[in-house]
Amino acid sequence: MLLNTDQRAKLDPSDDTLFYEQPRLVTHVDEGFIQKLTELYRDRLQPNTRILDLMSSWVSHLPDEMQFEHVEGHGMNAQELDRNPRLNHYFLQNLNQNQQLPLPDQSFDAVLNTVSVQYLQYPEAIFTEIYRILKPGGLCIISFSNRMFYQKAIQAWRDGTEESRVDLVQHYVNAIPGFSPPEVITRPANFPMLLQLLGMPGGDPFYAIITSRVA
Ligand SMILES: C[S@@+](CC[C@H](N)C(=O)[O-])C[C@H]1O[C@@H](n2cnc3c(N)ncnc32)[C@H](O)[C@@H]1O
């Protein structure tokens, strides 16, 4: 097993559905992070393809000018997902209770997961499902920063460092035969020293792990 029981534990063990009951129409990372992510999507995604935004909210960070055949959303709050202008359809599902995605085999060209992987208690099962629903050659892009809902992140993430979290997500990918070796993209925050001198937080660092379904 990739994680032991303690490493999967959250400080707040209550049903995640309660935590996500109220919509949060906020951005969870700063503008610099979002620009880097949108640029990465512009670079790696193909127009007119089928995209799954797994663990989504009211924003998907896709480039405005890119059109897709279908963008499927998944999340925990209907009001947030209703507001997301990029989604053609969405479904609600607590992935810590049910890891099986209600989506056919080999039906997506890309699966995106933004600033959310830290909340998955059974990542092996979820990455197995991501693999199953991707078409051969399909992409998986997992991005994250150093922010989190601390009480809802798993211990392996909470107690780790930024470097160990990059390693952890690579382990998730490497655990699934048929995913390509993960590519890691690391970008420092924009102007961290300048922001700190102005008495502002240093900005959000950007990490992305990219893999594709080979077989
Ligand atoms: C920090 S938000 C990120 C939302 C969005 N990806 C973004 O970029 O703004 C974390 C998201 O993780 C998802 N999430 C958290 N716990 C979950 C769970 N147990 N099952 C399914 N999704 C969950 C929810 O969709 C929630 O909106």
Image: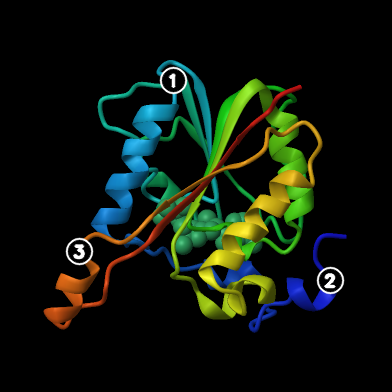
Which residue is at a point 72% across and 53% down the rendered structure image? Answer: 171
**Contact between labelled residues 2 and 3, with CB atoms less than 8 Å apart:** no
The kind of secondary structure element at disc 2 is: loop
3D distance between C-alphas at marks 3 and 1: 31 Å
Q: Is residue 64 above or below residue 95?
A: above
* Crowd tier of the residue under label 2, counting other residues whose Cα lies within 10 Å: few below 14, some 14–19, many 20 or above: few
Task: Give the x, y percent position of residue 203.
Answer: 28, 67
Residue 1: % across, % down: 88, 60
Q: Is label 1 within 8 A of ligand 1 (CB to nearest ligand atom)? A: no
Q: Earlier in the sequence, mark 3 or mark 1?
A: 1
For the residues labelled 2 and 1, the Cα–Cα distance comes to 38 Å
Going by the numbered disc 3, the residue's amino acid type is Phe
* Residue 107 x, y percent position in the rendering: 65, 22
- Res 10 visible: yes
Q: Quadrant of the C terminus?
A: top right
Q: Is 96 displayed left or right of 69 in the figure?
A: right
Q: Nearer the viewer, residue 3 or 92?
A: 3
Q: Which type of secondary structure does the marked residue at label 3 adopt?
A: loop
Residue that label 3 marks: 191
Frontmost residue, 184 versus 73: 184
Residue at label 2?
A: 4
Residue depicted at x 26% and y 55%: 32
**What's under tag 1, amino acid-wise?**
Gln
- Residue annotated with mark 1: 46
Q: Position of residue 160 (x, y in %)?
A: 61, 75
Q: Which residue is at 35% across, 21% downward?
A: 67
Question: In the image, 83: left or right of 75?
Answer: left
The structure residue drawn at horizontal position 67% and vertical position 21%, both measured from the top left corner, is 135
Q: Residue extending furthest right? A: 1
Q: Earlier in the sequence, mark 3 or mark 2?
A: 2
